[in-house]
Image (cartoon, rainbow, N blue to C red):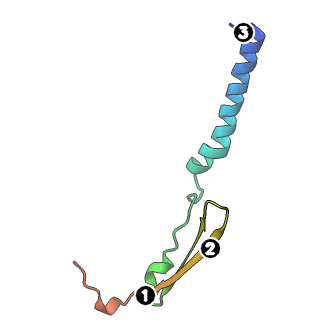
């Protein structure tokens, strides 16, 4: 069993780390009056023009050689041809 001083230091350190975690990670998510941590652009749903999508990937072979891949696509939405259920 550690001495009383070491035990108190451990508890103070633990409480300090818990306070830092609450301040840095938990409180911003539950803070009143703040926007959520991510934003959804609702305007993307209302556009009639195609929305571009881009992906990047890298494959690294066993000898250290790498190949980069880039994929682009555009998805359009035509409201006149959709049916509501």
The residue at which mark 2 appears reads as 68
Residue at the image position 39 percent from the left and 87 percent from the top: 77
Quadrant location of the N terminus in the rendered image:
top right
Residue farthest to the right?
A: 5
Does residue 74 sit above or below 69 in this rendering? below
Residue 67: x, y in percent?
62, 72
- Label 1 and label 2: CA atoms lie apart by 27 Å
How crowded pointer 3 is (Cα within 10 Å; few <14, some 14-19, many 20+) is rated as few
> Disc 3 on helix, strand or loop?
loop
Residue 27: x, y in percent?
61, 45
Could you tell me if the residues under marks 1 and 2 are in contact, i.e. CB atoms within 8 Å? no
- Sequence order check: which comes first, mark 1 or mark 2? 2
Residue 84, image quadrant = bottom left
The residue at which mark 3 appears reads as 2
- Sequence order check: which comes first, mark 3 or mark 1? 3
Residue 23: x, y in percent?
67, 42
Query: Which mark is nearer the camera, 2 or 3?
Result: 2
In the image, taking residue 53 as reference, residue 24 lies left or right, namely: right
Residue at the image position 65 percent from the left and 61 percent from the top: 63
Residue at the image position 47 percent from the left and 90 percent from the top: 49
The residue at which mark 1 appears reads as 76
How crowded pointer 1 is (Cα within 10 Å; few <14, some 14-19, many 20+) is rated as few
Query: Which mark is nearer the camera, 1 or 2?
Result: 2
Does residue 50 sit above or below 45 in this rendering? below
Q: Nearer the viewer, residue 55 or 20?
A: 55
In the image, taking residue 19 as reference, residue 39 lies left or right, namely: left
Task: Please indicate, yes or no, whether residue 52 appears anywhere in the rendered image.
Answer: no
Residue farthest to the bottom?
A: 80
């Amino acid at each position: 069993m550690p001495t009383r001083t070491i035990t108190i230091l451990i508890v103070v350190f633990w409480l300090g780390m818990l306070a830092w975690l609450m301040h840095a990670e938990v409180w911003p998510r539950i803070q009143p009056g703040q926007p959520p941590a991510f934003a959804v652009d609702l305007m993307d749903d209302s556009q009639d023009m195609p929305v571009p999508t881009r992906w990047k990937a890298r494959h690294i072979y066993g000898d250290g050689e790498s190949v980069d891949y880039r994929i682009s696509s555009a998805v359009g939405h035509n409201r006149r041809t959709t049916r509501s259920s």
